[in-house]
Image (cartoon, helix red, strand yellow):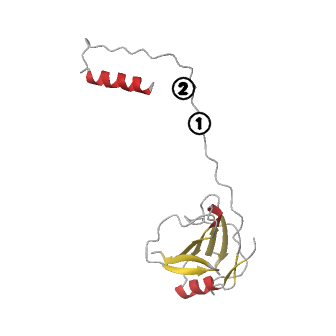
Amino acid sequence: MRFLVLACVILTACSGGSTADTTTTTLPPTTSTLATSTTSTTAPPAPCPPAPYQLGFLPPTVSSEEARDTADEPDEFTSMGGTHVRLWVNTDGETAIALVRGALPPQQFPAERGEVDVAGARGVAGPYPDGRWVVAWFNDPGDRCDEYTMVFYPPVSPAEVEETLAGMDRVPG
């Protein structure tokens, strides 16, 4: 059927637009339901459970060991659908560290990055031009909820990032 319609279009285009040239194509009747219109939407992914990590070290700018699960002003890391985000805030109440379960960074690392160990998992870490440090890793079996991104917001030093990662433990969950 598609061939006949395509042939009709080609013949019409090749006719040169003259009114004397007329092509008639009769298509066989169809009982196909392909002509019906359907609309589908994709549901957002189910949210991932909290990340099974505890931090044994927090940079001195972090105000408390208590973490919360909501961001006041989400950014490209903390606003990805279906993720679970755990936040630590600084003494001013602004986000200092975000641990995102369910996504890797939404963009490639714009600067050099190095390999790091995150509680036994191999990951990469590197600075962003705006002063953030980003760490990414995944665990087996590798489905969406096994992907992690950790963001350190300025001011933070590379040594504080390294010490925080060295103090992370994976806990059951």
Which of the two residues, 27 or 159, is positioned nearer the viewer here? 27
Residue 22 left/right relative to 126:
left
Q: Nearer the viewer, mark 1 or mark 2?
A: 2
Residue 5 in sight from this viewpoint = yes
Pick the quarter of the image with the N terminus: top left
Q: Which mark is residue 39?
A: 1
Residue type highlighted by circle 1: Thr
Q: Residue at x 44, y 77 (%)?
A: 112
In percent of width and height, residue 164 lies at: 62, 84
Place residue 154 in its image quadrant: bottom right
- Residue at mark 2: 35
As measured in the structure, the alpha-carbon distance from the residue carrying label 1 to the one carrying label 2 is 13 Å
Q: Nearer the viewer, residue 69 or 25?
A: 25
Disc 2 element:
loop
Count of numbered circles in the view: 2
Residue drawn at (26%, 14%) of the image? 21
Q: Are marks 1 and 2 in contact (CB under 8 Å)?
A: no
Task: Using the image, determine if residue 6 lies above or below residue 75.
Answer: above
22 over 144 or under it: above or below:
above
- Identified by mark 2, the residue type is Ala
Taking the view exactly as shown, the residue that stands out farthest to the right is: 172
What is the residue that sits farthest to the top in this orientation?
A: 20
Q: Is residue 131 visible?
A: no
